[in-house]
Image: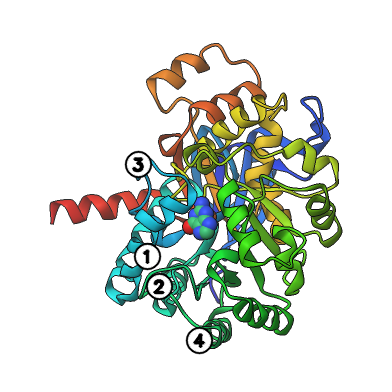
Amino acid sequence: MSKPPSQKLLRGRVLDFNAEPQDATDTSAYTYLTDGAILIEGGRIADVGTFADVAQRAPAAEIVDHRPNLLMAGFIDTHVHFPQVQVIASWGAQLLDWLNTYTFPEETRFAEVAHAEAMASKFYDLLTAHGTTTAVAYCSVHKESAEAFFGEAARRNMCMIGGKVMMDRNAPDGLRDTPQTGYDDSKDLIAKWHGKGRAHYAITPRFAITSTPEQLEMTGALVAEHADCFVQTHLSENHDEIAFTAELYPDAPDYLGVYETYGLLTPKMLLGHSIHLTPREIDLLAQTRAKPVFCPTSNLFLGSGLFDDAGLRGKGICNAIATDIGAGTSYSMLQTLNEGYKILQLQGQKLHPLRAFHWITRGNAVALGLEDKIGTLAAGSDADIVVLDARATPASALRMERAETLSEELFILQMLGDDRAVSEVYVAGVSAKTETQTHDRLALTA
Ligand code: GUN
Ligand code: FE
């Protein structure tokens, strides 16, 4: 008789969303089990329910007791720059100067395979430590950087979305492709990686300023030829950027109109920032179902502006949320929510913790159209799970003494949490955070 596949049963408090909570009292949007369990088998979630029920249905499962911590779906970061891990915290500039002074010189280093591979490994260690199990990433212009990005994700069995950036002007030597090489390299990468294991490809024109009309034309061809790939770029982040774009594309009605002209707007398109929008652009986003991506720590760091979440949502637009490392200042989606909360406060808008935690899990998965695989704990989903400890630091432990409800606990995590609040992470059912830490300790003592 063949041995049954091994089963792991995680015990703890379980929180899982099935819809976006409309307000603080919307208990129909989620399930919260004070003594819950998640059964993992073959990298997927096989069962979820109360511990008593699930344990009875799977008597042979190995039990991992995470009580009193909170189990939820792994976090999803929908906009991050993998070659900017050593750009984060670079002083003093706003967008265009920041790109020219710090970011472009740093990204030239990713032409070197060994460097790209070393940074990919650090990048995934950091994401994992912060509870992020899926990210949508920009690689550098070099095909090699995308190879390193996808290769390392495959070794770790992580669900990753990314693409090499296409950029053929307004960038230094060593950081430009051509319309033809950008097209060819993207095409090769799609053939090699898209749909392999847990990988998805994102066709990635960096932004209008760094692409000629010829390159955007060929990008449109790629999008038409690969309708199942994601598309990502930047939109209306900064006033000088918008003015320069208008100079470069004088015939376009507005910034989004540039991407519209070349046929890039689809429901699979992610538009980083989308801060300073005209009414026409907002209507076009609603019509095409392209997704704005809110990057709070980055928008504050670069002084870019305040994302109008309520205004866009009011038009029926589905917004994603992200770190935007390395203009973003934290890998933590919890810290991203913290700064997001404050940006909305400045505009008289609210971010309730239930909606906040929905956003960084199922909400971002819905924006990606991947909610049947990631972002929830539904049976059949990939077993990407975070274990959260709201008492991980002295300050949060002290605050937790006065917390009485789930919402209060979530808000404490949202405002005070970071990687220290992430006590364990499972990637496709395998514990990944403590393994990484053990690995680091071994490396230090070697
Ligand atoms: N616009 C074009 N490239 C970038 C980038 O790398 N970061 C940010 N924040 N905005 C951009
Ligand atoms: Fe960005």
Which residue is labeled 2 in the image? 175
Of label 4 and label 3, which has the lower sequence position? Answer: 3
Which residue is labeled 4 in the image? 181
Residues at marks 3 and 1, CA–CA distance in whole angstroms: 17 Å
Q: Closer to the camera: disc 3 or disc 1?
A: 3
Between residues 283 and 171, which one lies in front from this camera angle?
Answer: 171
Q: Residue at x 42, y 76 (%)?
A: 142
Of label 3 and label 2, which has the lower sequence position? Answer: 3
Residues at marks 2 and 1, CA–CA distance in whole angstroms: 7 Å
- Do residues under tags 4 and 3 come within 8 Å of each other at their CB atoms? no
Residues at marks 4 and 3, CA–CA distance in whole angstroms: 34 Å
* Circle 4: residue type: Thr
Q: Is residue 56 visible?
A: no
Q: Residue at x 40, y 72 (%)?
A: 175
* Secondary structure beneath label 4: helix
Between residues 37 and 258, which one lies in front from this camera angle?
Answer: 258
